Image (cartoon, coloured by chain):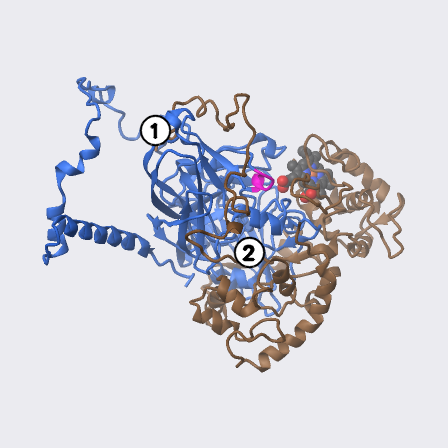
Amino acid sequence: MTDQIVEKVAVQTDESRNQSRRAFLKGSAAVAGGVMFTQAATAAEGAGYDAKKAVAPYAGKEEITNVLQDQAARKSLGFGVRKYPYGMPSPYEKEVQRRTLEWLTPDSMASITMTPLQQLHGIITPNGLHFERFHGGVPTINPDEHRLVIHGLVERPLIFTMDDLKRFPSVSRIHFVECPANGAMEWKGVQLNSVQWTHGMMSCVEYTGVRLSDLLKEAGIKPEGKWIIPEGADASGMSRSIPLDLAMDDCFVAYAQNGEALRREQGYPIRLVVPGCEANMWVKYLRRIMVHDVPMQHREETSKYTELMPDGTAQRFSWYMEANSVITYPSPDFKMQGPGKYYVRGLAWSGRGKVAHVDVSFDGGKNWKEAHFTSPVLDKAWTRFEVEWDWDGSEAFLMSRVTDETGYVQPPMPQMRNLEGTNNVYHRTAMVTWRVHAWENGKSGGMIENVQY
Amino acid sequence: MFNTKKSLVVASVAALFSGSVFAMSGSSDSNTASGEKIDGKYAANYAEIIKKADGKYLDKEVIEAILGKDAAYGRNGLEGKLDPANPYSFEVDDSIDGGNHGNAQCKIPAAFTEVHESVAKNFYNDDYTARGFGTPIAESALEKWNITVDGDGKGLPKAGVGMTVEEGGKVYVQFCGMCHGEFGEGAKGYLALAVEEDLVTSDFTDPAPMKAVGNYWPYAVTLFDYIRRTMPFWTPNAPYIGDAGYLGMTGYILQSNYIPINDEGEELAEDTFFDSAMLMKMNKYMPNQGNFFCDHRPVIHNARCMTNCDKTQVGDGTGNIENYRQARKLPDGTPQYNVPQRLHEDKPGVGHAGM
């Protein structure tokens, strides 16, 4: 099932559409004073739309009467083709950037930037906004010189050029990639008022590459081979131990992201894709896969990427990213525009499969309303949700809660803290809360604030 | 206030022994009725239960049907998951992986049916013939690339390659001290390599303990692999340091962390010759080695509630939605945003992103 992306547009979308249509039909029947309508629904709909009534909410709003002037764009020619052989966003979008917090790491060569989730739409992260995390700077590797070796407990150690890899059957899949430290700064309370800081250590792109299972089988795994150890060609020589059961599942070696070659920041020329698992395992600049009988216990699976519990014990080999969700609009980067209707939207994802439901609460978790999906619902990928909200202008506490196809329900923060303490660093996947300040005629400035229970 | 795992270590040892017995009885008696636990541990027909529930192996009711109501959650759930035979356990039988003083392993739990389905399809059930697009390569050609040392010490330089701890200290001070401190205390914001901090905390608000080689790292062999692979930061795997130098520094860092070399608790002396034999001897004396557990998540199994949810699920966990904590505030009492120039001074409206 995970082997193939089945594009399933959420049932919820149709359901909610049908629901409103049913409500509408009921309403029109009532208006007609109990007269039975036997016509097809379409006819009823045609009769039901009343243009005058539809625009009623605009009644009484002041009309603009100043004559609109032509602007510069209308009066002179724009630039011609080939000015930008590789296109860039409009200069007006220059604020849409990856950002870092200087105090997080002592060195920009072993650091992280976060994706501006508050400014993204849909489920695809543009390549230039993909979050970055590296442990030894970004190398610029010549693909003609780059090689991938598979060796160790295999029948036939092999070396591949990048052209060799592209000869293999390819797979293209959309997956999220998330650093397990996403949200780490929020274990002991809130620090940061932006979804870029609270959840930006992740992205979601379409990868194209070669099935890892094909490559491993090409070299012939010996029965004693139980683990694979992918390793990078960069200064950090990143390495992690991955059990064969995971490697043989839906992993692949990617050479492309969003239709073009991987960016250097994401592992050019090739990286490992380990869908649903900690991004640290998705070794970039991949040059070697060693098949082995035991795990390596390397630094990135002992000193780092293990979770300290309050009693001093620690959790290791925590491969899967738990289901998680966040409201991206409205969120602390935005301001409310006054009481009224809002279409609250956000992202949900699960390292264990597809998102099944997203519910949104406006009262700190007491009551929930099911959101519908506005994107395809894909395996181990971001899913975009949206839910209608009538804001009456009073203080509100917005939370989103995902349920994935395994039946796992995202927990509230106090529950996670009670069980796991606050020193884990990684895997803080409980819900976050946006506090919408009471409107009070705009006195609050329409602020939306990150708070924690 | 906290759930503790340390106290479970003792219990888990007992559970591990009895665990294999349960596993055997489980397989010989696979027709157990739905939900019936094997000696109160877990339902042997868990696969059937999961299948009936449409694959929802992490659904609260499914987990409770398999592991029992109290074993499914938090501390009790954890105890059960230390038993490798538990279908939700990531642990591997100690007799296979050497337990806490060997190269401990973890696995994907049996209940994660999805994974096993794909693996079976991609591997075991597939009769694959090589396409021949690669080029054969001799293991010996990888001599330079393959500097991997495993958890059992395979891949270490031969015994006899090394230097005294004192000599190792000199190399360390020359190439590492400026970033990690002369004694591993850390410098300029770079990581400390030796700290004497207790990893146990009693309250959520306690500062997070610092973790370094001596108080946290489970294996000493990791240190050699890592520093030879990546340090010094600007010029990793430096030929002018060489295997002898990397081993000497490993000895020096272990000494700075007071790692014992034998059961008597003796420590490395300045003139101790440090090589891979000494490293492997010390590998099992890492003080924190026994405190690591395989992933046991999720430990929280909630039902999806829609209206009037239980107060434990609402606000601060007692039903109070006004008891929240905020980020630092500005002098005027308003919350601080990270890009105040873009946001705080903006008028109410759509914000800088212009939805």
Q: Residues within 10 Å of mark 2 (few under 14, many from 20)?
A: many
Residue B29, quarter of picture: bottom right
Query: Which amino acid, by three-letter code, is at mark 1?
Result: Ser
Against B186, residue A232 (above or below) is below
Q: Disc 1 versus disc 2: distance between alpha carbons? A: 45 Å
> Mark 2 — on which chain does it sit?
B
Q: How many marks?
A: 2
Q: Residue B149 in the image: state x and y as whole percent.
A: 69, 54
The chain in brown: B
Q: Which residue was labeled with disc 2?
A: B300
Q: Which residues are magenta?
A: A184-189
Question: Which quarter of the rendered picture does the C terminus of chain B lie within?
Answer: top left
The chain in blue: A
Q: Is residue A185 magenta?
A: yes
Res. A54 in view: yes
> Mark 1 — on which chain does it sit?
A
Query: Which amino acid, by three-letter code, is at mark 2?
Result: Ile
Q: Is residue A69 left or right of residue B342?
A: left
Q: Is residue B190 left or right of residue A195?
A: right
Q: Which residue was labeled with disc 1?
A: A90
